[in-house]
Image (cartoon, rainbow, N blue to C red):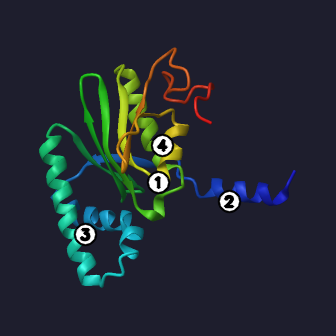
Amino acid sequence: MDPCRTIRGQARRAKTIEPSRFHLRPQCAADMPFLLHLYGDVRRAELDATGWPELQRHAFLNHQFLLQTHHYRTYYPAASFDLIEVADAPAGRLYVDEGQTDCRIIDISLLATHRNLGLGGAVLRQVVTRATVRRKTVSLHVMLGNPAIRLYRRMGFQVIDPSDPMQILMRCAVGPGAPGRIDDAGHPSEERIFE
């Protein structure tokens, strides 16, 4: 056995966030500064490539954030708009629109400091488990090139509509007898459907 591999695995597990260590709560007006900061954090790499001065970046982010917020609230008025908290501190956001047969994840975003620690997977498992109980699918759109696509595939999401050149629609079927998908306990089944 490779001792370096063992040490790396132990270090990775030490940085993992336990699923029970996060909770969701409805966002409120006082959360807007954090949500704007999160939006900027998520788009940091994209904006770094522009070379814009800080004032221009801030104006762009503020404008885009307000447009996105207005769009989500207008087109998904019945959705839940939650903050993801770890140790009572904001770590991200989760927006879900629960329809008759599908739970659409409108947005799931985490601060860079909380990515790749298992938090995104834990949040997704919670959404999928809830949908499983209600016999609904879970769907989301994701930008092409987003590293989270690997997580979604591991969780059993399949590409449903690859026709858009910017983003893809993915869906996760739930329930018993759904091979390569999420079982009743909210875990991916053993049969793999992705290469």
Q: Is residue 70 left or right of residue 182?
A: left
Is residue 19 visible in this depiction of the protein?
no
Label 4 element class: helix
Q: Is residue 173 left or right of residue 71?
A: right
Q: Mark 4 Cα within 10 Å, few/some/many (few <14, many 20+)?
A: some
Q: Earlier in the sequence, mark 3 or mark 4?
A: 3
Position of the C terminus, as image quadrant, is top right
**Residue beneath disc 4:** 122
- Residue at left 37%, top 48%? 165
> Cα distance, mark 2 to mark 4?
19 Å
Q: Is residue 156 left or right of residue 135?
A: right
Q: Earlier in the sequence, mark 1 or mark 4?
A: 4
Q: Is residue 130 above or below residue 13?
A: above
Number of disc labels: 4
In front: mark 2 or mark 1? 1
Q: What number is the disc on residue 61?
A: 3
Q: Earlier in the sequence, mark 2 or mark 4?
A: 2
> Cα distance, mark 3 to mark 4?
28 Å
Locate residue 117, reporting x and y percent: 54, 54
Given the image, on which type of amino acid does mark 2 rest?
Answer: Ala
Q: What number is the disc on residue 11?
A: 2
**Residue beneath disc 1:** 145
Label 3 element class: helix
Label pair 3/4, CB-CB below 8 angstroms: no
Given the image, on which type of amino acid does mark 1 rest?
Answer: Gly
Label 1 element class: loop
- Residue at left 15%, top 42%? 75
